[in-house]
Amino acid sequence: MENKIEPATTIESTMDREIANQYKNIPGWGMDADPLNNPTYPIKHYNGADHERLNYQKPEQQPVTVEVLQSIERPGLSRVFGTSTPPQGLSGVIRRFAFRYSESTYAHWVPLVMADRIGVVEGIIDDLKHGIVPNIFAEKGWKAEWKYNRKGLIKNVATGVVVAAALALLLKNINKRSAKAF
Amino acid sequence: MVPFNIACGACPFCQQELFGNCHESNSEATAVGGIFGYSHTAGGYDGGQAEYVRVPYADVGPTIIPEGMDLDDAVMLTDVTPTGYQAAEMGGIQKGDTVVVFGAGPVGIMAARCAWFFGAGRVIIIDHLDYRLEFAKSYAYCEAYNFKDMEDPVVFLKRTTGWLGADVCIDAVGCEAAGNVVQSLVGRKLPLTGGSATALHWAINSVKKGGIVSIVGVYGPLDALVPIGNVVNKGITIRANQASVKRLMPKLIDHVMAGRLNPKGLISHRIPLEEVAEGYHIFSAKRDNCIKPVLIPPSASAA
Ligand SMILES: NC(=O)c1ccc[n+]([C@@H]2O[C@H](COP(=O)([O-])OP(=O)(O)OC[C@H]3O[C@@H](n4cnc5c(N)ncnc54)[C@H](O)[C@@H]3O)[C@@H](O)[C@H]2O)c1
């Protein structure tokens, strides 16, 4: 549950404004500045607040009651956060690993995409543990498919059966053939 | 009316009305603000499709429903309407512009409708579902074409815009786009990329040189296949964001109350919250000529 602070490497984060606000003895500094040259208008109402960086009056901190994963691209937790899905089980282990890397890396996102998939299976196992047999048909809303696309649903299921049968046949044949080869 | 995004009102982004990019509502990503019911990456919050929901910063984001406003209009003002409006707004539409909207879902239809507020001269919507195109034509007063009838949507759009390209293109499709086998395979089936970027690809290639591409379609955080070389060589301006619902609220309330905009007109289905799974399936699989379903919790009287 520890949310570590990015170690300062070459330049402290507090130096950013100091450097930017220093007098610049550079010929023509600021001469061509044009406040209208701002493609973010009117979506962003520019007022220079960005230059204050993280020095703003922050809202009250939500108490940390669950494990909260934190992007390493920020120095601390956001003042509020969701508590619906703290990391748990195998998917949680993978998520914790992913959060060792920045949002700019595959090492972050690929494990998270995997963890989502694993989370689905974990959910089903959790259901079973609680004596609930998940009703995938209902959870996927296929009752609606039965109502509005009966033909399509039947066709899909039939295609599935045919494909599975064909695959089984194929595998059987391949097995036979490879058996002969020996 | 509770916006779909969570905003603190204090960080530099909120202070500058980028309420969809709040810095104090999501610890799990710096690239995404906090959003109700929108995965771990958007903060891990429970969703609003419930009887009750915890609303952080409830004194900042939400707006009291104006007296006399239809509740169906109010619910549509929390997501779809501001998103469609901002899609048009980000297009930087000038009077007389030809605007092409990819995607005739609720968001794209609303974008097409709102393009007129900015003085568009011609609005074209592209999809592959005829029932949606038919609906869009009358709801958004626009032209509507099915990309399945075209050999190449980009050539079609070049020809119909006097061979120069559209002035503004809007991507209101996002990562589930159909229409290109490779994009669908790597973006939807496998998925190796941040989503199928077919609509964005078409948008970039159909807009004129020096034109503007506005993106509200959502993509995942992984890279997507986008012809970025054409963006550079054509000098295209790309503008994109999650909608800043709170910023747009006063303007949209005005349009609705004055009778210029009819958000509730997009609602095609009213589904009890208990049947949410079927509701999701109907919307995502586009069954029963669905445009926009709303969920009715048991505690809300079926008004
Ligand atoms: N930026 C935001 O703030 C924000 C808010 C809400 C929704 N969204 C996003 O906007 C997008 C649209 O939302 P929606 O509710 O209208 O979804 P939708 O699925 O109803 O609409 C998408 C439409 O695009 C069509 N389509 C598919 N491939 C296409 C292609 N290549 N070219 C043209 N059309 C194509 C589909 O047939 C469908 O009608 C989604 O990605 C959604 O997540 C963004």
Image: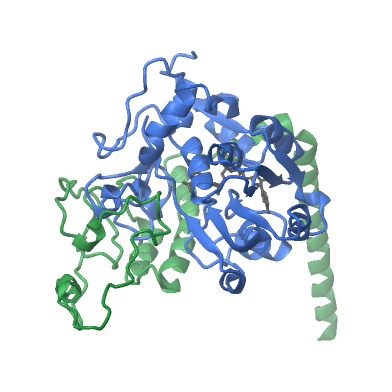
Chain colours: A green, B blue
Residue A25: horizontal and vertical position, in percent?
Answer: 19, 83
Using the image, determine if residue B99 lies above or below residue A97: above
At x 81%, y 80%, the residue is: A178
Decide which of B68, B296 is in the foreground and name it: B68
Task: Please give left or right for residue B181 compared with residue B44 in the image.
Answer: right
Task: Please give left or right for residue A164 compared with residue B67 in the image.
Answer: right
Exactly how many numbered labels are in the figure? 0
Does residue B84 appear anywhere in the picture?
A: yes
Q: Which part of the image, by quadrant, shows the N terminus of chain B?
A: top left
Using the image, determine if residue A104 lies above or below residue A154: below
Using the image, determine if residue A163 lies above or below residue A136: below
Report which quarter residue B115 is drawn in. top right
At x 60%, y 68%, the residue is: B225
Does residue A137 appear anywhere in the picture?
A: no
Residue B147: horizontal and vertical position, in percent?
Answer: 76, 50
Report which quarter residue B31 is drawn in. bottom left
Residue B132: horizontal and vertical position, in percent?
Answer: 70, 37
At x 33%, y 50%, the residue is: A45
Decide which of B141, A78 is in the foreground and name it: B141
Residue B201: horizontal and vertical position, in percent?
Answer: 64, 62
Using the image, determine if residue B29 lies above or below residue B284: below
Task: Please give left or right for residue A181 compared with residue B122 in the image.
Answer: right
